[in-house]
Amino acid sequence: MKFMPMTALPLMLTAILLLAAGCSSTTASISPAKYDKMNCPELNNAVGDTATDISRTAIARGKVANTSVPTWLLGGERVKTAVANRETARIDRLQQQQQVIVATRKQRCPSAQ
């Protein structure tokens, strides 16, 4: 095993912090037309899937927010904040997507009202 110089250690820790936050920041676009073609069970599944994604993203955001960054790691807090903000933005997009699905479901499915 090779000895790593101290200059590589901050870069490695920053990379680990980014990976711990999760890299799944892609979200399906919010298109009401996409949901108009779905039947009631599919809409129910879409609501559940979106809720699962929201929970998963919130857990990842919490892990990042609770990560202890050493004071000697320059820029570590900034990276931590940026990753947490990215996850917050993803949660907001998912919540908007879920609102569109719920509105479509209320309109089309009598059992959802």
Image (cartoon, grey):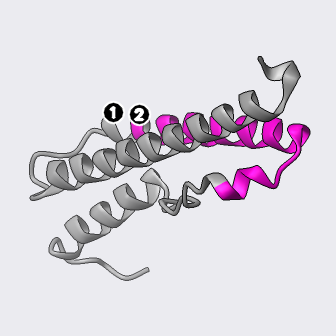
Choose between 106 and 4: the one closer to the eye: 106
Pinpoint residue 37: horizontal percent, then vertical percent: 81, 55
Q: Amino acid at mark 2?
A: Gly
- Give the tally of numbered discs: 2
Q: Are marks 1 and 2 in contact (CB under 8 Å)?
A: yes
Q: Can you give x and y, in whole percent of width and height, for residue 98 in the image? A: 60, 38
Question: In the rendered image, is residue 1 in sight?
Answer: yes
Q: Which residue is mark 1?
A: 66
Nearer mark to the viewer, of 1 and 2: 2
Residue sitting farthest toward the top:
113
Secondary structure mostly taken by the magenta-highlighted segment of the chain? helix
The relative height of residue 112 versus residue 19 in the rendered view (above or below) is above
Q: Which residues are magenta?
A: 33-62
Return the residue nearer the eye: 66 or 46.
Answer: 46
Q: Residue at x 41, y 40 (%)?
A: 61
In the picture, the quarter occupied by the N terminus is: bottom left
Residue under pointer 2: 62
User: As shown in the figure, which amino acid type bears the numbered disc 1?
Assistant: Asn
Quadrant of image for the C terminus: top right
Residue drawn at 75 percent across, 43 percent down: 46
